[in-house]
Amino acid sequence: MLATLLQNNSPLDESVKTTHILTLLPRLEKLPGKIDLPGEHTLKALLLRRDIPLGQISEMPVCANLQNGALCAWAMVDLSKPVFDQHTHVRKALQLLLEEGPTQIHVSVHGNAHQRELLARLAVYISWINGAVLPVRKLKPDRKPLESIVLHGHEDPDYFLSLRAQAEGNLLARGLTGLPPNELTPKTYREQIEKLAIREQWKYEEYDLAKLRKLGAGAFVAVAQGSDTEDAAIVHLQRHNGKKPGKTIALVGKGICFDTGGHNLKPARFMHGMHEDMNGSAVALGVLLAATRADLPVNIDCWLAIAQNHISPRAYKQNDVITALNGMTIEIIHTDAEGRLVLADTLTLAERQKPDLIIDFATLTGSLYTALGSRYSGVFSNHEPLIQKALAVGKSSGERVCAFPMDADYDVELESKIADIKQCLLDSDFDHILASRFLSRFVNDIPWLHMDLSACNHKGGLGAVGTDITGFGVAWAMAFLQKFLTS
């Protein structure tokens, strides 16, 4: 649950009873004469004691106890810097307060009207996504969730509704991704999604294994058949905006609830954490929730490929030749490249509905992580204008993306002597590009963006998010959809 927001356009009066205060200012070299800054005398004394200039808190926030016992954090935000840097700076200031586990914080923003507006949006959004607590299985959780935020210095009810929707989507993606694999199996995941669909009034449809076999979705079935239970499925959710027909966006997510690697078994150090291999589906769900709560004027088809990749006598293996839903035959090279197989049939189902755009999210390749680390995610597309929009939105949303080539001459690496296409190569430093070329065979000419989520987990947090699990992709997608709808 997200904290309740209370707005007060007047400055924070130090006589107000409070325990934790976040004070944000634009970058200044000295404080103006009249500013009504909470804890101004304490801040000046702190800077004098540490012999640092005021402007340095634009690089590193500081905090101190006020005379009334409240803990106050001060930060200057350089609004000329990239949004990612602004997010990181405010999040670090907020974390100085959240370490004590407060149930309420007061946020005080300063500057001219425009600066206060920008700072308020930063503070409220970052307080929402970091104030909530992700599910844990401890007898005593590390801290309590933030219950309320009291904002001083700016009021903006309409825009805050959009920010809240985005924060709710991010929290859903992170909360699902962090669940242990014995709790989030394909069966229980589908049950959770169905409950969410009922609550949000989305149309819910399942393509279970029996139905997928009948349809000829051999790529998805090949991966799913290795599990003990037949609980894998492709889930289809539909959200209609209830207004004029408008555009339809298809969101596709990889939902491998646990990935052992199959017969090409992962070593322990690489198998640990593979319960997060369903992150792409969680991000797609988070985007759907955020778009619904924000009432975006767009129809959304959300397709989730939910399965596990296990080793068993029935599991698919190297040298198998399988037939995908679109009729293409695929030579299996490596059973740990299962993500592109479950996505292949899911993308085919999405493409058959002829949406205006397909966006898929997946924790797909290790080579993308090698290329970028976990500070960026990679994007690929069959339409160059989409790449330019994706990059621009990465800068404006604070979730940065890097574009990679996927020219047709890469296809020579996927030529097979016995099938229409190879699944992958046994050893490739550019597997992220080959995976994208593979997936492109299943979208035809529909405008398509593929995001390989190398930034789904970053130690210590990333940008606006302070947890290792970042929910990367929700904020980017919300900004991208709004840009797409106005173009």
Image (cartoon, grey):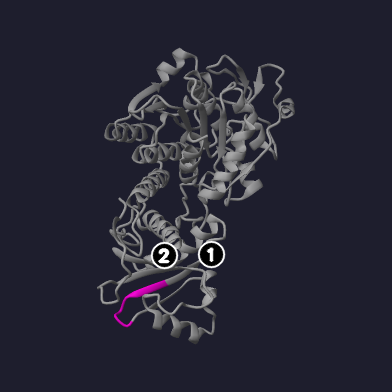
Q: Secondary structure at mark 2?
A: helix
Which is more N-terminal, label 2 or label 1?
Answer: 1
Nearer-the-camera pick, 178 or 241: 241
Number of numbered discs present? 2
Q: Which residues are magenta?
A: 67-73
Nearer-the-camera pick, 126 or 100: 126
Q: Is residue 222 visible?
A: no
Percent x, y for residue 190?
35, 32
Determine which residue is flagged by label 2: 94
Identify which residue is drawn at 46% across, 77% down: 32
The amino acid beneath tag 2 is Leu
Q: CA distance from mark 1 to mark 2?
A: 16 Å
Identify which residue is drawn at 52% across, 33% down: 360
Label 1 neighbourhood size at 10 Å, few (<14), some (14-19), many (20+)? some
Identify which residue is drawn at 38% across, 41% down: 290
Q: Are marks 1 and 2 in contact (CB under 8 Å)?
A: no
Task: Determine whether 199 is above or below 45 in the image.
Answer: above
Determine which residue is flagged by label 1: 78
Q: Is residue 413 visible?
A: yes
Percent x, y for residue 396?
53, 49
Task: Determine whether 412 is above or below 55 in the image.
Answer: above
Q: Is residue 409 left or right of residue 192?
A: right
Q: Which mark is residue 54?
A: none
Q: Secondary structure at mark 1?
A: loop
Label 2 neighbourhood size at 10 Å, few (<14), some (14-19), many (20+)? many
Percent x, y for residue 148?
28, 59
Q: Nearer the viewer, mark 1 or mark 2?
A: 1
Task: Determine whether 236 is above or below 85 in the image.
Answer: above
The amino acid beneath tag 1 is Asp
| Residue 288 is covered by the magenta coloring | no
- Residue 418 picture quarter: top right
- Residue 13 picture quarter: bottom left
